[in-house]
């Protein structure tokens, strides 16, 4: 196929995932050996192992991939990444799939649907203060998304407070306006990516 | 030896003991850690899941501050997640000129610029092991941890994937084992030393997270460790603060204290446990400290004695 012919057709799902992953992901090199799934500490609870997910990506089964809980159950331990015989940046690909699932609204059907909300709540505090805020995060996230679990979390939160391991109010950096200007510009630039 | 210091959000509060003990230890070792003024959160594992460019820009602001404040071209991060994000951002900005240009365009909105490769980010353990060295550490040991059985726990991000260069084996690291031996401790075999603590999974799926924590606790208990020693605030939090929840969930009864490597270094250098922030753990460290002749005073007022189980649920008057 000539270069013009490639440019003329719409990108495949595989090409999209590769394009949205920073650096050289090498995802196209996957040989389906399964080392990733065998190395994954949370693999047993994933609807698809990374290997399985990559086969689905190759087959263009977009919905199935973006609805899977697998990227959300990735704990970013990088075991698969260092073991992959093809040097695929698997953890980075998982992050890409999370972003695509959010953009396309599929994650709400996943069994891990709380995960993006946790990430978003975490980021909200960072964007308003420049620092993370555990008590605010725990309260906002658990009360909004998992009120039943919130009750179970209380002894732990009290324990953290009692040991002086949790702040009651967030810390705000001096340059919060500067940080917000940077993030705003980054969001404008990052737009579709 | 003078370095820039990026404590990260955890060390401000939930892992204040790590910060406190790190400061005590580096002072003894003659290392000067100068905190970057007005640093911000690294985004942990959350921002990269949501929005790519702001995630890099968030981290890059810290690199730009470190570069501009001229403390040192080396930046020390004691938290493994911060260490990962800082090294990852620097590495990918070096590899991709497009990413570097975009990140710098965002930074320009705040009057900043970062030249990739300018700041070398290092983990505190790596600095102690390589720049100070085992011999210099050994020379400072005044109260060896003789008889203390330690499970040296590395977790993930200090050894994987090595964005800042490979400092130890990604699957079978040994630096922390050697350091603990230099302190006089007995290092037990701990096959899961580089396995994941579950990270933020405690918030996403307790079933998944608790199983990951249980495996680590069981492994340390199987090898009869008195204490698990960590290099990361997330690992400490998961193994320590969730240990009671894990016990409840699986019907187990693990009571393995989880301390930072800097706390054990401080004890071996003769510092008091209070100076090192010991006593803020959920799982009591006193039985382990007893073995090395360190007494930890009670920091809290003694609680009212428990009512006997057979007592009727009646209100009772406080004794004057």
Image (cartoon, rainbow, N blue to C red):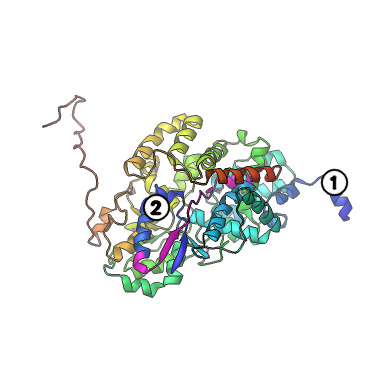
Report the residue at 63% width, 40% height from top: A68
What segment is highlighted magenta in the picture?
A: B27-52
* Image quadrant in which the C terminus of chain B is located: top left
Q: Residues within 10 Å of mark 1 (few under 14, many from 20)?
A: few
Residue A134 point in image, percent of width and height: 44, 41
Residue depicted at 48% across the width and 48% down the height: B198
Image coords of residue B218 (percent x, y): 39, 52
Q: Residue furthest front?
A: B111
The chain under label 1 reads A
The residue labelled by disc 2 is: B218
Give the camera-side residue of B220 and B232: B232
Q: Is residue A78 left or right of residue A20?
A: left
- Residue at position x 26%, y 59% in the image: B272
Q: Farthest residue toward the left?
A: B320
Q: Is residue B269 above or below residue B114?
A: below
The question of residue B34 being in magenta is answered with yes
Q: Where's the N terminus of chain B, which quadrant?
A: bottom left
| Residue A183 in view in this figure | yes
- Which numbered dot is residue B87? none
Q: In the rendered structure, does residue B234 fall within the stretch colored magenta?
A: no
Label 1, secondary structure: give it: loop
Residue B187 appears in view: no
Q: Decide: few, some or many residues near mark 2? Use Cα within 10 Å; few <14, some 14-19, many ≥20.
A: some
Mark 1 sits on what residue? Answer: A9
Q: Secondary structure at mark 2?
A: helix
Q: Whole-Å distance between the Cαs marked 2 and 1?
A: 54 Å
- In the figure, residue B182 lies in which quadrant? bottom left
């Amino acid at each position: 196929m000539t270069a013009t012919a490639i440019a003329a057709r719409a990108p495949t799902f595989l090409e999209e995932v590769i394009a949205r992953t920073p650096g050289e992901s090498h995802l196209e090199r996957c040989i389906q050996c399964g080392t990733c799934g065998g190395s994954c500490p949370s693999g047993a609870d994933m609807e698809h192992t990374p290997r399985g997910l990559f086969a689905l990506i190759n087959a263009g089964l977009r919905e199935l991939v973006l609805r899977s809980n697998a990227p959300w159950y990735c704990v970013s331990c990088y075991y698969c990444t260092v073991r992959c015989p093809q040097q695929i940046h698997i953890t980075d690909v998982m992050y890409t799939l999370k972003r695509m699932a959010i953009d396309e609204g599929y994650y709400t059907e996943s069994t891990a649907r709380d995960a993006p909300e946790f990430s978003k709540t975490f980021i909200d505090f960072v964007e308003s203060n420049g620092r993370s805020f555990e008590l605010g995060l725990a309260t906002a996230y658990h009360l909004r998304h998992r009120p039943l679990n919130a009750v179970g979390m209380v002894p732990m939160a009290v324990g953290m407070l009692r040991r002086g391991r949790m702040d009651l109010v967030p810390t705000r950096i001096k340059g919060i306006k500067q940080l917000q200007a940077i993030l705003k510009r980054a969001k404008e630039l990052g737009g579709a990516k | 030896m003078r370095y820039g210091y990026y404590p990260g959000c955890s060390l401000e509060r939930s892992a204040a003991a790590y910060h406190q003990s790190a400061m005590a230890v580096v002072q003894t070792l003659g290392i000067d850690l100068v905190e970057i003024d007005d640093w911000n959160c690294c985004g942990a594992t959350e921002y990269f899941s949501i929005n790519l460019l702001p995630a890099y820009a968030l981290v890059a602001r810290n690199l730009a501050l470190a570069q501009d404040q001229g403390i040192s071209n080396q930046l020390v991060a004691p938290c493994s997640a911060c260490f990962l994000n800082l090294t990852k951002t620097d590495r990918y900005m070096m590899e991709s000129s497009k990413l570097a240009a975009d990140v710098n365009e965002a930074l320009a909105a705040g009057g900043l610029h970062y030249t990739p490769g300018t700041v070398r980010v290092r983990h505190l353990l790596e600095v102690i092991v390589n720049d100070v060295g085992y011999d210099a550490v050994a020379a400072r040991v005044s109260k060896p941890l003789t008889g203390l059985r330690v499970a040296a726990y590395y977790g993930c991000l200090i050894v994987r994937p090595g964005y800042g260069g490979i400092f130890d084996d990604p699957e079978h690291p040994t630096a922390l084992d050697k350091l603990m031996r230099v302190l006089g401790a007995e290092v037990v075999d701990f096959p899961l030393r580089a396995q994941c603590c579950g990270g933020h999974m405690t918030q996403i799926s307790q079933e998944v997270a608790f199983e990951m924590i249980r495996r680590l606790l069981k492994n340390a208990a199987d090898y009869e460790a008195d204490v698990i020693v960590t290099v990361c605030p997330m690992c400490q939090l998961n193994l320590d603060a969730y240990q009671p929840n894990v016990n409840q969930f699986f019907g187990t009864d693990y009571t393995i204290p989880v301390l930072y490597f800097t706390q054990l270094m401080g004890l071996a250098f003769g510092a008091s446990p209070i100076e090192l922030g010991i006593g803020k753990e959920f799982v009591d460290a006193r039985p382990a400290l007893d073995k090395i002749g360190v007494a930890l005073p009670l920091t809290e007022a003694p609680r009212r004695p428990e009512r006997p189980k057979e007592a009727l649920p009646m209100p009772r008057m406080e004794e004057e």
